[in-house]
Every structure is written in structure tokens, then in C-alpha cells.
Image: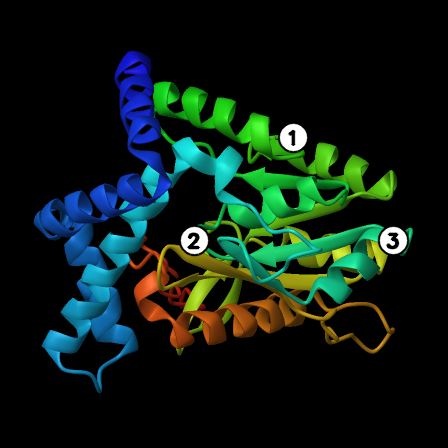
């Protein structure tokens, strides 16, 4: 499997970023709708967009497969894909909006938290942070296949700063990053079995509360960052200002309320560009409440 994945990466590399992206899109647009994950995507879209026609929902799902194929093919080009230059901000493949917030985040001498989502090429923010001196550790979920995970990790380690796989005990390493004044970045739009319940796209969803817990403990700024895929194989990165998170009666950040606030931002991003989100994920899996046992009288 490792050899196969390396061969695919070499082929993608030989095609160049533009042709590789187009080729990946053609493959997933063709074969994605034949996979069981397509049924998951359509079920999600029917639940979130009941007002849309089936044809409109299929178009969004097909766009999501297109984006997934492009993102996969672009892995082989992560070292060259991000070409933003502060001196020539409008001349490259990537443009960055909110650079002033990035500079403040980098230079304020405080720890910080950054949340994102599986939109467009979601790997680019970590590359941007590393390229421009933000001491950041990206928390990621490794692919299930060990061979794929190994090759992807090799690519990420060449282009990004700190990396921390989501695993048992990872919270201690993440806490250490913040104690040293560093920054943590995490995708928050996937199902997390032991998470807190938030409203996401009008439906209850379980979300990992770790960023909100760290925000409460360190009382540090929390920013959102997203990537938008633009025409002509270009991208836009957008960093939000620090969020004003809800607090409890004691003045401390409310964990569930904070995750709801972050999820609202992500929901706005998804609704703006639904064809660029990962609809194939089983995001909404909140178990039904168990009935209370009858009490003897």
C-alpha cells in the first residue's frame, strides 16, 4: 500500500498542480457517486436542505466529490501550492484575507487557538502559519490505512510546523503547546462520540470540546480560519478576528456555548460554499435519549 500511494504521489507530482487537480476531480466526479459514501452525502443534503430539489442536492454532492479529488491530488504539491507573498499579495495562487489579525496573533506573546473545517484544501492554513512564523501545532486525525497515513505524514512534515495526531494522551501534548505560548489549530466539523451537543446546520451534532476547554483554562484568543477554492485553481484564506465567546456566571468561558459559537461560524462557511464541504462524513450521529426507568410506587 505504501508503494502504491507513493506511486500515485509521483504521478500527481509529474502532472503539475493544475493538471493533477483537474485529474483528481475527474476521477472522483466519475466514481464518487458509485460509492456508499455518496448515499451518506445525499442523505445529509436532504436533511439540511429540504427546500432544494434533488437535482440541486446532487449538484452539491458532485461538487463535493470534485473538491475532494482536487484536494487529494494536491497533496503531492503542498510544498509549492502555497505561494502567498506579503510583498505581492495579489500575484500568486493564494490570497490571504485578515493578514493583520494573523500578525497580531503571531506577535501578541499569548497562546492562541484556531479552528477550521474540511473546506476546499483544508491543509493550507497550517502551511501558511509555518511559512510566516506562527508557532502553531496542527491537530489532525490520521487516515485509517497505516500506509496512507505514513505517506501523508511525510508530506505534512515537510510543509507544516508542529503536528499532533488525535490519539489517547494527545491532550497533554496540546496543553504543553499552550503552556509554552504556542498555538493550536484543529478541524472541528467531524463527529466526536464523547463530545458536546451543538446545533449544526439545524440538527444536533456531537463536537469535540477540547478547544473550548483550553480557551476556558488559558483564557486565550480563539480565531477561525477557512479556505475558499476560487476559479482558475486559486485559493483564498480567511482568518476571522478573535471570537467573543460566551461566559458563565463566574466569568469563565462556557464550554458548550463556545463550541456552539465556533460551530455557527463553520455553518456560515458551509452554507456559503456547500459544494466545497465534506458531505460524505456521517456528521450527525447524536444517539436518541434513553427513556427514564420506571420508579416503583
As rendered, which of 121 and 249 lies closer to the eye? 121
The residue located at (50%, 22%) in the rendering is: 154
The residue located at (48%, 53%) in the rendering is: 93
**Quarter occupied by the N terminus:** top left
Instruction: Return the disc, 2 or 1, that comes first in the chain's sequence.
Output: 1
Can residue 107 be seen from the camera position used here? yes
Q: Splitting the image into 4 quarters, where does residue 86 fall?
A: bottom right
Tell me the crowding category of disc 3: few under 14, some 14 to 19, or many 20 or more residues within 10 angstroms, Cα based.
few
**Quarter occupied by the C terminus:** bottom left
Q: Position of residue 78 (x, y in %)?
A: 48, 37
Can residue 119 be seen from the camera position used here? no
> Tags 3 and 1 in contact by the CB under 8 Å rule?
no
Identify the residue under disc 3: 107
Identify the residue under disc 2: 191
Q: Nearer the viewer, mark 3 or mark 1?
A: 3
Q: Position of residue 170 (x, y in %)?
A: 64, 33
Identify the residue under disc 1: 169
- Residue at the bottom extreme of this rendering: 51
> Tags 2 and 3 in contact by the CB under 8 Å rule?
no
Q: Position of residue 270 (x, y in %)?
A: 41, 70
Looking at the rendered structure, the secondary structure element under dot 3 is helix
The residue located at (24%, 62%) in the rendering is: 63
> Would you say 146 lies left or right of 279 here?
right
* Cα separation between marks 2 and 1: 19 Å
Q: Splitting the image into 4 quarters, where does residue 95 fall?
A: bottom right
The residue located at (20%, 83%) in the rendering is: 52
Tell me the crowding category of disc 1: few under 14, some 14 to 19, or many 20 or more residues within 10 angstroms, Cα based.
few
Looking at the rendered structure, the secondary structure element under dot 1 is loop
Q: Nearer the viewer, mark 2 or mark 3?
A: 3
Instruction: Return the disc, 2 or 3, that comes first in the chain's sequence.
Output: 3
* Cα separation between marks 3 and 1: 29 Å
Amino acid at each position: 500500500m505504501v508503494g502504491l500511494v507513493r506511486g500515485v504521489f509521483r504521478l500527481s507530482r509529474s502532472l503539475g498542480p493544475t493538471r493533477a487537480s483537474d485529474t483528481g476531480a475527474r476521477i472522483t466526479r466519475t466514481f464518487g457517486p458509485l460509492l456508499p459514501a455518496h448515499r451518506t452525502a445525499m442523505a445529509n443534503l436532504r436533511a439540511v436542505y429540504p427546500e432544494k430539489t434533488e437535482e440541486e442536492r446532487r449538484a452539491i454532492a458532485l461538487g463535493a466529490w470534485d473538491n475532494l479529488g482536487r484536494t487529494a491530488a494536491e497533496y503531492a504539491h503542498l510544498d509549492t501550492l502555497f505561494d502567498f507573498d506579503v510583498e505581492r499579495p495579489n500575484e500568486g495562487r493564494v490570497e490571504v484575507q485578515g493578514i493583520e489579525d494573523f500578525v497580531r496573533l503571531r506577535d501578541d506573546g499569548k497562546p492562541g487557538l484556531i479552528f477550521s473545517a474540511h473546506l476546499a484544501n483544508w491543509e493550507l492554513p497550517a502551511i501558511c502559519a509555518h511559512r510566516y512564523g506562527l508557532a502553531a501545532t496542527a491537530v489532525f486525525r490520521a487516515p485509517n490505512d497505516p500506509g496512507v497515513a505514513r505517506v501523508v505524514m511525510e508530506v505534512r512534515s515537510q510543509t507544516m510546523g508542529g503536528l499532533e495526531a488525535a490519539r489517547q494522551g494527545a491532550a497533554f501534548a496540546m496543553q504543553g503547546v499552550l503552556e509554552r505560548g504556542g498555538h493550536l489549530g484543529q478541524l472541528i466539523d467531524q463527529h466526536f462520540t464523547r463530545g458536546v451537543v451543538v446545533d449544526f446546520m439545524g440538527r444536533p451534532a456531537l463536537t469535540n470540546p477540547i478547544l473550548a476547554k483550553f480557551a476556558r483554562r488559558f483564557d486565550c484568543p480563539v480565531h477561525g480560519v477557512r479556505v475558499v477554492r476560487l476559479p482558475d485553481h486559486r485559493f483564498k484564506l480567511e482568518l476571522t478576528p478573535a471570537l467573543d465567546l460566551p461566559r458563565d456566571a463566574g466569568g469563565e468561558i462556557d464550554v458548550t456555548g463556545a463550541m456552539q459559537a465556533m460551530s455557527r461560524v463553520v455553518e456560515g462557511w458551509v452554507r456559503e460554499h456547500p459544494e466545497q464541504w465534506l458531505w460524505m462524513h456521517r456528521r450527525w450521529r447524536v444517539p436518541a435519549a434513553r427513556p427514564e426507568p420506571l420508579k416503583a410506587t
